[in-house]
Image: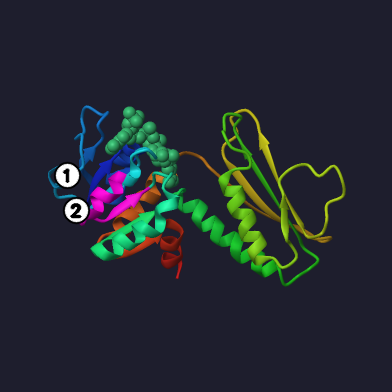
């Protein structure tokens, strides 16, 4: 039987999830978005209807109130909307108390999650061989608001935690010789470059480059659909990367 979805927020992501739902054996039975004529305006038991699970890609200003409402109605929830990280522990407590399930994440790309896992294992492996140095590079289009990217910050953190030879990250140009304990992670912004993250390992003998390159935003929607199917029938509070780790076990 198809997994029945209620989409909270029917903007770019909501519409993309709706268009890909069928390909992942899901169907949209309801959508809630006060600014979309074809959607309901408010979250209630009636507007969620017979959905098995809700997916929120709405707006940081309303996401916390949406989460509270869905938990109170006892429905599992996938939250792609960001901006509530200061409330994680409170929401975890509420989800556990209500005996429902929730998966959240700032990046629902399955490819990026598996890439992160691969980078972690590669860093651990090369930590045994001190003739290999590590570096990072991220490239994005010239409209990107932040630099370095949030993913570059996350990757550098993973490298720091798993490589005993690196103690700090240099995201800027050094204008001097780099110290051995420094990880150089560079950012480039130009044109329409699709989001690209690379982690490299370099020795006198060879170079290994791990690269993740975004092709479209579909990856976020596929990840949200996978999480929706995964959380139905489960209890607990999970990050998207925890879910991916469980699937990889
Ligand atoms: N985790 C991930 O992988 C991931 C990926 C992509 C995007 N995101 C995040 O997801 C969110 C949505 O992204 P998007 O690109 O789909 O944005 P979007 O196109 O602006 O869509 C959001 C929709 O939600 C509506 N909305 C506002 N208040 C609402 C409420 N109370 N209840 C339900 N819907 C409401 C918005 O209306 P108005 O436009 O009138 O406000 C809009 O139609 C953003 O926070 C974005 O950063 C996360």
Q: Secondary structure at mark 2?
A: loop
- The correct choice, above or below, for 32 with respect to 79 in the image is above
Element at badge 1?
loop
139 part of magenta stretch: no
Tell me what residue is drawn at x 14 percent, y 50 percent. 50
Residue 69 is covered by the magenta coloring: yes
Q: Quadrant of the N terminus?
A: bottom left
Q: Label 1 vs label 2: CA separation? A: 8 Å
> Which quadrant holds the C terminus?
bottom left
Q: Position of residue 47 (x, y in %)?
A: 16, 42
Q: Is mark 2 within 8 Å of ligand 1?
A: no
Q: Residue furthest right?
A: 177
Q: Which residues are magenta?
A: 65-79
Q: Which mark is residue 130?
A: none
Tell me the colour scheme of the image.
rainbow
Q: Name the residue carrying label 1.
A: 44
Q: Position of residue 60 (x, y in %)?
A: 39, 40
**Quarter, ligand 1:** top left
* x then y, percent, for residue 63: 34, 43
Q: Which mark is residue 73?
A: 2
* Labels 1 and 2 touching (C-beta < 8 A): yes
In the image, residue 62 lies at what x, y percent? 33, 39
Q: Residue at x 85, y 42 (%)?
A: 175
Residue 233 visible in the picture: no
- Label 1 neighbourhood size at 10 Å, few (<14), some (14-19), many (20+)? some
Q: Residue at x 33, y 62 (%)?
A: 93
Using residue 142 as the reference point, say whether residue 96 is left or right of it: left
């Amino acid at each position: 039987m198809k997994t029945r979805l209620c989409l909270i927020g029917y903007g770019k992501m909501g519409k993309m999830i709706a268009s890909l739902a069928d390909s992942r054996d899901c169907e949209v039975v309801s959508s809630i978005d006060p600014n979309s004529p074809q959607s309901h305006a408010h979250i209630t038991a009636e507007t969620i209807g017979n959905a098995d699970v809700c997916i929120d890609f709405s707006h940081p200003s309303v996401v916390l109130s949406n989460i509270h409402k869905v938990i109170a109605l006892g429905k599992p929830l996938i939250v792609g909307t960001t901006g509530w990280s200061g409330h994680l522990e409170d929401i975890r407590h509420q989800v556990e108390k209500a005996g429902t399930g929730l998966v959240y994440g700032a990046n629902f790309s399955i490819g990026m999650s598996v890439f992160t896992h691969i980078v972690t294992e590669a860093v651990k492996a090369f930590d045994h061989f001190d003739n290999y140095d590590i570096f990072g590079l991220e490239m994005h289009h010239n409209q990107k608001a932040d630099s370095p990217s949030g993913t570059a910050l996350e990757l550098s953190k993973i490298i720091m935690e798993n490589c005993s030879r690196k103690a700090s990250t240099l995201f800027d140009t050094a204008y001097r010789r780099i110290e051995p304990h420094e990880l150089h992670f560079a950012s480039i912004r130009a044109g329409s470059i699709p989001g690209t993250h690379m982690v490299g390992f370099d020795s006198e003998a060879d170079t290994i480059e791990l690269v993740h390159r975004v092709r479209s935003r579909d990856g976020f929607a596929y990840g949200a659909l996978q999480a929706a199917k995964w959380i139905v029938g489960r209890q607990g509070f999970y990050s998207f990367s925890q879910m991916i780790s469980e699937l990889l076990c």
